[in-house]
Image (cartoon, rainbow, N blue to C red):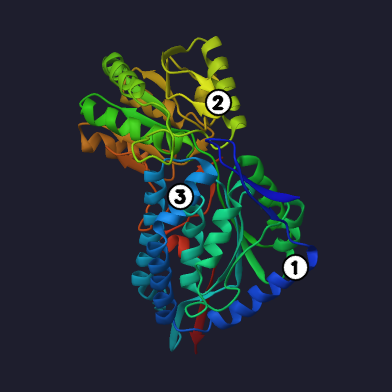
Amino acid sequence: MAYVSINPWNGETLARYETLSAEAIKDRLAQSEQAFGRWSRSPIADRCQALNKLADALKHQREKLAGLITAEMGKPITESRAEVDKCILCCRYYAEQAEQMLQPKEISSPAKRSFVRIDPAGTVLGLMPWNYPFWQVFRYAVPNLALGNAVLLRHASGTGGCAQAMESLFEPEAFPPGIFQNLYVEHEAVESVIAHRAVTGVTLTGSEQAGAAVAAVAGRYLKKSVLELGGSNAFLVLQGADLEEAVAGAVQARMVNAGQSCIAAKRFIVEAPLYQAFAERFAQALAEISIGDPMLDETRLGPLARESFAETLQDQLKDSLRAGAVLLAGGGCSGARHEATLIGDVTPGMRAFDEETFGPLAALVRARDAGHALELANQSRFGLGMSIYSGSEEQALSLAARADDGAVFLNSPVVSDPRHPFGGTKASGYGRELSREGLLEFANIKTVVIR
């Protein structure tokens, strides 16, 4: 088996990467174990300095790396540059904050002294997807590196070039050899990696099916796991909301990365008095977005990463229309190029409501009132993020307190940010990435008591 990188815009085969033998995998794991021993004993200040150097390397190679992202998975080049910039922000944030985050916490007790210290635990394996090939990796790798853990990456098979490029960023003058390693391994070999004594935890960003399989393997070997899975984010538009602001937010929330994002808004739940006006404005905004060459700065919508993804989205669209939904904009598809599409009169039971739609398809749902809107939003097996557009902050905060999701954004699309914990509930997974909570997921939280 080989990793094959194919440009989704023109179908060109970019590169092939051969998978590692069982012996080579063992060697990489041994290197990771050695690197952890050295890195975990280094002062936090030195690790933070190394993260700043990593940020510098990203900045220096920004255009090259952005071009590679676009070539391998098709997102517009402007979004690829923004993805690299976000990785730089993540490095800078932990370089600045990690030392404070890792300070021991004193505990009041009968002992002479008792405290909790935060220590690194070992090597963390990341199983990462293609849709944000750099950001998804940096989102778990940087906090773990700041903590003192080593990192292994098993990337998606279509983004092997991005995986290789990331490994090359870890320059030996800043990082010990083997502290971050890319593994070209087959699915069948993942279990042997998780089972190895050096690996203390595994984090996966991907589908429900992949998450369940990895969690089962991790549980078998008593290794901790963090799962960041799918989403069907609700985008509530309530009476009193600024319609112009809500439409602009809706376009951004649904069309970024051609809709191929777990945190993209997918169900747009609108109070009945605003429904028609919002539908007309949203449809017009989407009709103005055309598919173009993702390497051009003016392109707002590129192809989906694979033709099969567009076929799945078409199936969801057509089934929903047969069930009673109405096509309001777009709907066309040729190969991997899927138009920005809006359907209305979507109700529970339709695929566009019940399933995660991973592409530029927006589903418009009518709600009787704000309470009904929240009820519809929570009527999902997913619980990743929610947007609430309202003219009343008090109303929005009251609804946010009753939302099932791991994040609620008021008058804004849901976005991930190094400063905020990120993760979901229900079928969207468990555990958190980013902020201090993400840094602690794979730590040895150690109690020390002096009698």
Q: Is residue 101 visible?
A: no
Three-letter amino acid code at the position of disc 2: Leu
Q: Residue at x 37, y 56 (%)?
A: 85
The percent coordinates of residue 431 (x first, y second) are: 52, 54
Q: Mark 1 or mark 3, which has the lower sequence index?
A: 1
Q: Mark 2 or mark 1, which has the lower sequence index?
A: 1
Three-letter amino acid code at the position of disc 1: Ala
Return the residue nearer the eye: 10 or 40.
Answer: 10
For disc 1, the marked residue is: 24
Q: Which mark is residue 172?
A: none
For disc 2, the marked residue is: 313
For disc 3, the marked residue is: 67
Q: Residues within 10 Å of mark 2 (few under 14, many from 20)?
A: many
Alpha carbon separation for disc pair 2 and 3: 26 Å
The percent coordinates of residue 64 (x first, y second) are: 44, 56
Q: Residues within 10 Å of mark 3 (few under 14, many from 20)?
A: some
Q: Mark 2 or mark 3, which has the lower sequence index?
A: 3
**Which mark is in front, 2 or 1?**
1
Alpha carbon separation for disc pair 2 and 1: 39 Å
Return the residue nearer the eye: 424 or 105.
Answer: 424
The percent coordinates of residue 325 (x first, y second) are: 47, 12
Three-letter amino acid code at the position of disc 3: Gly
**Which mark is in front, 1 or 3?**
3
